[in-house]
Amino acid sequence: MSQYLPIVVMAILASIFAAGSFIASGIFAPKRPTAAKSAPYECGIVPRRGPAQRFPVRFYLVAMIFIIFDIEIVFLYPWAVAFHQLSTFGFVEVLVFAVAVFSSFVYLVGNGALDWGPKKRLQPLVEDETESISSELVA
Amino acid sequence: MSGLVQVINSAPALMASVAIHFPSVQYGDLVPELALLVGALVAMVSSALARTKDISFPYTGIGIVTVVLAGVWSYHLSTIVASSGPKAIVAGAMAVDGFSTFLMVLIAVSLLLVILLAEAFIYEVGSRGPDFVALLLLSGSGAMFMASAEDLLVLFVGLEILSIALYVLVAYCAQVTLSREAAFKYFILGGFSSAILLYGIALTYGATGTTNIGQIALFLSQNTLTSNGVLLGGMALIIVGLGFKIAAVPFQLWTPDVYQGAPTTVTGYMASVAKAGGFAGLLRVLYVSFQTVRIDWRPVILVMCVLTLFTGSILALVQRDVKRLLAYSSINHAGFILIGLYVATQSSLGDSLYYVFAYSIMAIGSFGCVSIIGHLKGSTEGPLDIDSLRGLAREHPRLAVVFAILLVAQSGAPFTIGFLAKFSVVSAAALGQHYELAVLAMLSAVIAVYFYLRVVFAMYRPPLTADTEGESGLTLTDDSGDVMIEEDGALDQGDLLTVTRSRTIPVAASLSVGLALAMTIGFGIVANPLISFASSAIPLH
Amino acid sequence: MMLATITTPDLIVFVVSGAAALVGALGVITLRNPVHAALMLVMTLFSIAVLFVEEQAQFLAAVQVMVYAGAIVVLFLFVIMLLGVDHSDSGARDAIRWQRPVAFVSAVLILLEVSVLARTRWATGAHSTTAKLTGSGAHVSELARSVFTTYLAPFEATSALLIIAVVGAVVLSRTSRNRSPVRETERPESVGGSGAEEATLGSTPEVRS
């Protein structure tokens, strides 16, 4: 267990820093709130309505990208540990796995998973929003 | 840094101390599974690169090509098995034997029929693009993994591939409330049953020290467990987990709702391939792994079998929706398939598999007819009331005849595949001297005839009066002739998506149903090829 | 007598992480704010990872952190964001009235089951490990050997599962039928069941507005 000591020390230091920051700002920061000060800051403009309550479901695709590569890492970890023993065979098998997963990534991007931002808002409400990015990919 | 160098230098020594025997992977033996996986990937990647997403036929083409390749190769493998014997591949985790190749041919044939049906209907209500075909191919590859699983983990992963894709397919028309509801129910119960199956596998591993199906059998034949609670628990949970998938009573509760709510094409897929996968697992695990402890599982299967036979046939009598009725009929058929497992001889196993084949073909054909009728009635892929069938024989006489033949074949009429299937399992029961079971099965078949004929008679009766008809939903016509879809807000009509379009039977659908019909009658009259193919479907070990 | 074999640092680690896991678990079911509950879940899962390390199960510990504390909780947070952060459950109404007593009873039953199982000696099969486990990294490399030899087929098949997850997410998150008439773009901040349903399967007003 002694090899994990650095992690424990790290965890303790991190919590001390986090707690210290809170305590210090609680003690030293001046607290004189006014209505204008506590309003959300929006470039000096008074917000007209509350922030969006929900994220669009499209962001779920980003989570999906994260998940698939996260799961891939689960398999890469033992492979990396036993890399020398597994030699070429292991490499090929992991490559097959990775290619399969990567092609699903291509599909996701082709379906506009990484396609958000202000550009889309300017577009008219087309039938298929993913057309634009896929034609860009081809071009 | 020096530590790193040390690690790298010590690696050869490590390698010398523990030599790894890598499995030799003969990719030729894996072509059916790999073809479906690669086909799905090709469809997905090509769609990402394509300019427009609003097309379906290229993906249908990709699907057909890969499925035909997989099917032909499976048959090729079966001839190899016939000449040079079965073998275990990929470190003994998978098997190429008569059992797996037979089921893989069946899965490929079913997939072909389903893809054709999907081209005709699913894109009317679901979105176009590669998604449907990709999911279908992936799901089919899962069923093939299950068919050739020689390791419980392959079985489990195959089952997950099969079912997770299926959850999405059931929800493919997610804007239809019924489809959403069905997907949700199926997902919850399916996830539950998968977890139960996995727990069963874990307990079996604990009791025997291996997950390999053949080695479990070997272990159990060489050892006697003095306290076999873990083994029995594992076995029971495996039966429960797979019982959900094959919709055996008492694990059938999801079936009617899901069959009704899913798009009809997907229902056909579920009734054929998903069921075939479940039976592949159940038959192989119980028959091979637990061969020596069959005294423990056979009574359970007997009870399940009788319950399934009668619950399916009796509850089907009172259904008003054709898809629900066919769902209960599917439960009834599962009971017949279980007979072969209960008898548990090599030939009865072949009878069960023959039944699975026959049922799959007839089920896809029947659900294809339901799809066509629903399409004609303005409820594409939606539910279909039996009363709405009335007058069909006058409007579409050929369709009515085809549907009638498929239904009568399911009930076991002579000169069809359905008769041979029923005959083979019942005679297997009689041969095994389980006469009570044979009598019960025939009794249930007689009850089943009634509800099949009910549908047939409905088609040949005069239509209901005009005011009750044509109320199936709102129609919204577009001047340009484009298809417009409107979801009705009312509770009872909210599930009906109505598409205005010239109501003709799509060619792909006729092709699919025609193929199913041809096989139903063809293999019913020229029976020998399929029967001998099924009788060669022997599992490894 | 069992305690005698455990060294003091190990005992301290066990007690601390066990306590943290319990506190986190209690936090998950008592905290009103779903985001806080999710973060408490991270604490529980991380503590369990520490317990895994103490059991010399390094791979499980790594997977616990990567998959559960990482991926699963991120997915939870995504779903919470999709449903709306402020949509905190009041806890006054349970969907199923008897779910709390049933949960309590089943918790007690599971405790009983675990204690019974822990005291019973079941006959189990041959041990399946093929080599002695020596050294701290041996477990993971032993696992790698299994994954790339005995369990090669399920390992490669898992890639299909990941692909399905991707296609499934795309299909289910797709805005309703492409050619359907355009829905209204402005939508009031809705709180409640139908709004939640809309967020997971229906249209995405924020992007389209």
Image (tube, rainbow, N blue to C red):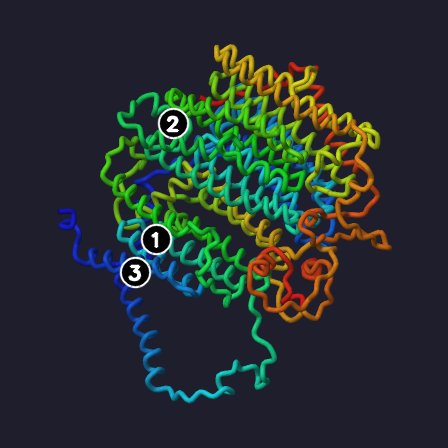
Question: Quadrant of residue B502 in the image?
Answer: top right
Q: Secondary structure at mark 2?
A: helix
Give the residue drawn at x 41%, y 24%. Answer: B297
Q: Measured along the vertical axis of the image, is residue B451 above or below residue C174?
A: above
Tell me how far mark 1 sits from mark 3, CA to CA. Answer: 16 Å
Judging from the image, mark 1 belongs to the subunit labelled C
Q: Nearer the viewer, residue B523 or B464?
A: B464
**Closer mark to the observer between disc 2 and disc 3:** 3
Amino acid at dot 1:
Ala
Residue B148 horizontal side relative to residue C174, left or right: left
Q: Measured along the vertical axis of the image, is residue A30 above or below residue B328?
A: below
Q: Which residue is mark 1?
A: C61
Q: Measured along the vertical axis of the image, is residue B173 above or below residue B29?
A: below
Amino acid at dot 2:
Gln
Q: Residues within 10 Å of mark 1 (few under 14, many from 20)?
A: many
Judging from the image, mark 3 belongs to the subunit labelled C
Give the residue drawn at x 73%, y 30%. Answer: B513
Give the residue drawn at x 32%, y 84%. Answer: A27
Q: Position of residue B32 (x, y in %)?
A: 59, 33
Q: Which residue is mark 3?
A: C20
Q: Nearer the viewer, residue A84 or C132?
A: C132
Give the residue drawn at x 79%, y 28%. Answer: B461
Q: Which residue is mark 2?
A: B215
Amino acid at dot 3:
Ala
Tell me how far mark 1 sits from mark 2, CA to CA. Answer: 30 Å
Q: Position of residue B288 (x, y in %)?
A: 44, 23
Q: How many marks?
A: 3
Tell me how far mark 2 sits from mark 3, CA to CA. Answer: 42 Å
